[in-house]
Image: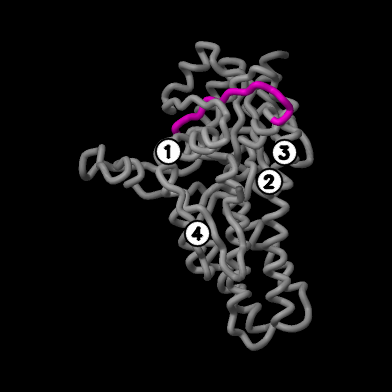
Amino acid sequence: MRTIEWKDGTVILVDQTKLPNEVVWVKIADYKTMASAIKEMKLRGAPLIGVAAAYGLALCAFHSKAKTREELLKELEESAVVLRKTRPTAVNLFWAIDRVMKKANETKGTKEALAAAVVAEAQRMADEDVEVNRKMGKHGATLIEDGDVVLTHCNAGSLATVDYGTALGVIRGAIEEGKNVKVISCETRPRLQGAKLTCYELMRDNIPVTLISDTMVGYVMSRGMVDKVVVGADRIVRDAVLNKIGTYNVAVLAFEHGIPFYVAAPMSTMDQSRSSEDAVIEERSPQEVTNIGCERIAPEGIKVLNPAFDITPLEYVDAVITEEGILVPEVSLKKKRKD
């Protein structure tokens, strides 16, 4: 089941803020509404955000009242500015916008030809995402053994992509090969994507999963309950992985317990032009920390720090799983320890 689809000038997507209690499909007909959906996290996950942004541009082109190619190109540039401002950390957002705008600028001919090219490019990106994830799953499955218990953090499954998933795609790939795999899912405070989304996905697909609080990671590892860790990524820079807050904790604990730590992400998540010093970490609303749902759990007036992502040095990463194969960082703390 695709998380997002284009249908006759409308984008239909699952409102992930409603899961797991109800499955609500939202219809989006313009780029401003798409920008709001991204910002409000009705959809999330780096690959999905990228495709959604591409569809936002497609909506602009499809419904444009522009009379000329030049007018439409200007509208696309204006909509791209709005979409770029939604979330700063996941590089797929910017990669997708750049790719569609490049296609738009290269397309000659009428306004209609330009609009058709933009829509086709967005649809092509959605189809590619599914294929990329399946390739990633096949590569990553070689790292998973029969009987493994795999710990994952946040949600990097079909809900974070168009379909299939990155980290969960690796698990699906292993299961499709006939391997018996179980999953431990961290709850992922403060928005609880692990508890709400990963557990929902895996239970829906009859994949065995156990939910733990984020504070239990060290406990389950020390008890020998985890064989591998597989997480996704929102941006991979030259020296680090940017992913959901709490990933760094998991990586350090995996290192201390000698557990392989893998990152599954498409090549579009690579940002080799930057290092961790250049990273822009999204700071989200204090209410995500002070409240659980509508219920306040912290005293009024408390100061809150709420970064949405953290930075895991590549030294802690055993391998990065991509659609092109498995990449091993040149510097590895685990290599050093063995040496």
Number of the front mark, 3 or 4: 3
Q: Disc 3 designates what residue?
A: 136
Q: Amino acid at mark 2?
A: Met
* Secondary structure at numbered mark 1: loop
Sooner in the amino-acid sequence: mark 3 or mark 4: 4
Q: Position of residue 157 (x, y in %)?
A: 59, 40
Q: Secondary structure at mark 2?
A: loop
Q: Considering only order in the chain, which callout, 4 or 1, is on the residue closer to the N terminus?
A: 4
Question: Contact, CB < 8 Å: mark 4 with mark 2?
Answer: no
Alpha-carbon span between mark 1 and mark 4: 21 Å
Task: Check the image and tell me how it is coloured.
Answer: one colour
Q: Camera-side residue: 267 or 315?
A: 267
Toward the bottom, the furthest residue is: 67
- Separation of disc 4 and disc 2 at Cα? 20 Å
- How far apart in space, not on screen, are marks 3 and 2 (Cα)? 14 Å
* Gap in angstroms between the C-alphas marked 2 and 1: 26 Å
Quarter holding the C terminus?
A: top right
The local crowd at label 1, few if under 14, some if 14 to 19, many if 20 or more residues have their Cα within 10 Å, is some
Range of residues picked out in magenta: 176-187
Amino acid type of the residue tagged 4 in the rendering? Thr
According to the picture, the residue beneath numbered tag 4 turns out to be 86
- Residue nearest the observer in this picture, 19 or 252: 19
Q: Which residue is mark 2?
A: 270
- In front: label 1 or label 4: 1
Q: Is residue 31 left or right of residue 315?
A: left
Residue 192 is tagged as: 1
The answer to the question of whether label 2 and label 1 lie on touching residues, with beta carbons closer than 8 A, is no
The amino acid beneath tag 1 is Leu
Q: Is residue 194 left or right of residue 303?
A: right
Please tell me whether mark 3 sits on a helix, a strand or a loop: helix
Give the answer, above or below, for where 115 lies relative to 250: below
